[in-house]
Amino acid sequence: MRTKLVLTFIALAYTLLVWRLYQLTLVEGEKYRQLSYKNYYRVVETPPIRGIIYDRNGTPVAYNQLRFNIGIDPHLKGEEFNQTINTILKVIPDLNRTQMVKEYKKWNSPYYHRPIVVVKYLTREQLYQIEPILTLNPHIHIETGYLRKYPFGEPLSNILGYVAEPNKKELQKNPVIALTHQVGKRGIEKYYDDLLQGKPGEKKEIVDARNKVLMSVLIEEPVSTPLKLTIDHRLQSFIYNLMKEKKYTGAVVVMKTNGEILALVTHPSYDNNLFVKGISYKNWVKLLHNLYHPLWNRPVMGLYPPGSTVKPSEVLIGLSLGAISPTQKIYCPYSIEVGHRRFRDWKLGGHGWTDAVKAIKESVDVYFYKLGLSLGIDKISREMKRLGWGVKTGIDIPGEQAGLMPTREWKEKRYHKPWLPGDTLNAVIGQGFVLATPLQVARNTALLASGKLPTPHLAMEIGDQKVEKPAKDVLTPREKKFLYYIRKGMYEVCQARHGTATSHITTPLALGCKTGTAQVTSIPQEVLNRQKEEELAYFHRSHAWITTYGPWKHPQVVVTVLVEHGGHGGSAGGPIVSQIYNWLLKHNYLKTNPDDFVKRPRR
């Protein structure tokens, strides 16, 4: 009996052993093989190289220069860590130890197994001198890195932006940033950051029990995506230097009528190369406290009273709604009185009998006062927004402002006051509460020139994919019929006797134009004789606008210029506009016929 019990026990134990062996080898064998495999083998992501940015002609405007970084093994403590840091400081004594330790702690965690970079952007020459000493320490690693370079500096900074070290929030946004240690902070670098970061590669690493890499094999290359812009860097620099020579503060937009931006200039600007390694406190304070705000991207972020640049759109609205007819003449004295207040024209003595074309050509304020009272602010605001005023353009760059086309409801909500007739009169001449960006003015000009409202864009090709932004068909058939009168008025602004820009445009190309003088300070009612703009203190002078398209008969390009405190649009912006069109002609951007050129009369 005892023998049977012993044999039964042995048989049972043997059965259990066989069953467990079956489980470990056949049922769960793969699981444990993988666990064992992971003890000495791992797949590690390799950082991609940030995508190169090109202008429309293939010239690199943002690229990467080869540099070398020094990394330290993670999870080091105490004396081992201190000795490693000291080794680096012995060969590069001008480094900041506190900053190196801070950077190490920022990345060090139980889940981080890559070397932590504490020194960046060493040149090949610098590395050759110190590499033999550094490689004696097994905890120090030398890695390939890249320094972002912007070869054209100030002229393109407002478009490109820059890259810099990421913050915690940015690290959570995209896991690739933890590999590249770079993130786009402004401009195109920020808007297309996910694309420019690229796709990580992968490599297999075999490690020992102490996590030391014994061998690595690349299994997938990282992928970089280039970006081609619509910008011509030559034109961008040419215009920037024009503004610089004239000491103008302002913005210039050069855009094809299909929305492709050829130049998007703000002056003054800043050198984006200052930010790549981390800008010094001294340079940052200098930029931040600059009275002319060089960090401000004026074409898309700057909000200004658009002045008389709104008038062609308002004539179109008045014609389409039947408030006026194309040939109807309205008597326009020097001023009209509304609500015990006198609203004056810019021309002493007034303009007399005025039709739609003359109203645009000579920018007749009283004509628009009467038109505004006839239409009312609700209709004006609704229709102007449809034509692109007071709404974002949708351009592919961060920070765009929507501008403002006010309504009764807006004023009551914002100021808790009712809308007054005088508010309407200010609005119809682009003053009062009305605000616009230079890009909005350019976009509206493209609508009047081409009949369609484009979406301005800076990306031309992403990788090998062409970017297309179809224009919107926002005009009614009735409005399209009336465009002839709008364009005729804009033609006469630049070419006809008494046109507000005629004596300031020198290009031989026939243009459609509209000037604007936007006051920044009010003129008291009792002042009858206004001071000349040049007699005013700089910051009391009006902003000067001129927005144009050309050639007039075959519109292809829009050029809009804003000169802050420039006085009159024609005199301040006309010479710049002329030089830009001459540049475009010289560089074959315009397809022209003989009838696209004119011999200009002089006033």
Image (cartoon, helix red, strand yellow):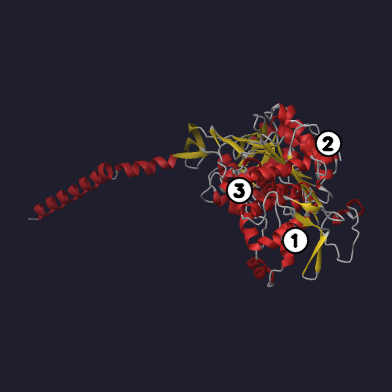
Name the residue: 20% across, 49% down: 16
Helix, strand, or loop for circle 1?
Answer: helix
Q: Which residue is mark 3?
A: 479
Q: Nearer the viewer, residue 572 or 61?
A: 572
SS state under label 2: loop
Please report whichever mark, 2 or 1, sits nearer to the chain's N-terminal start: 1
The quadrant of the picture occupied by the C terminus is top right
Question: Percent position (x, y) of residue 234?
Answer: 73, 32
Rendering coords of residue 306 (x, y %)? 74, 53
| Residue 102 percent location from the top left of the image | 66, 51
Location of residue 299 with respect to 203 vertically, above or below: below
* Residue, disc 1: 426
Image quarter of residue 416? bottom right
> Which label was assigned to residue 67?
none
Q: Nearer the viewer, residue 478 or 453?
A: 478
Work out whether 150 lies above or below 74: above
Identity, as a three-letter code, of the amino acid under mark 3? Glu
Question: From this viewpoint, which residue is outermost toward the left?
Answer: 1
Mark 1, Cα crowd under 10 Å, few <14 / some 14-19 / many 20+, is some
**Residue holding disc 2:** 601
260 vs 205, left or right, is right
The residue type indicated by label 1 comes to Asn
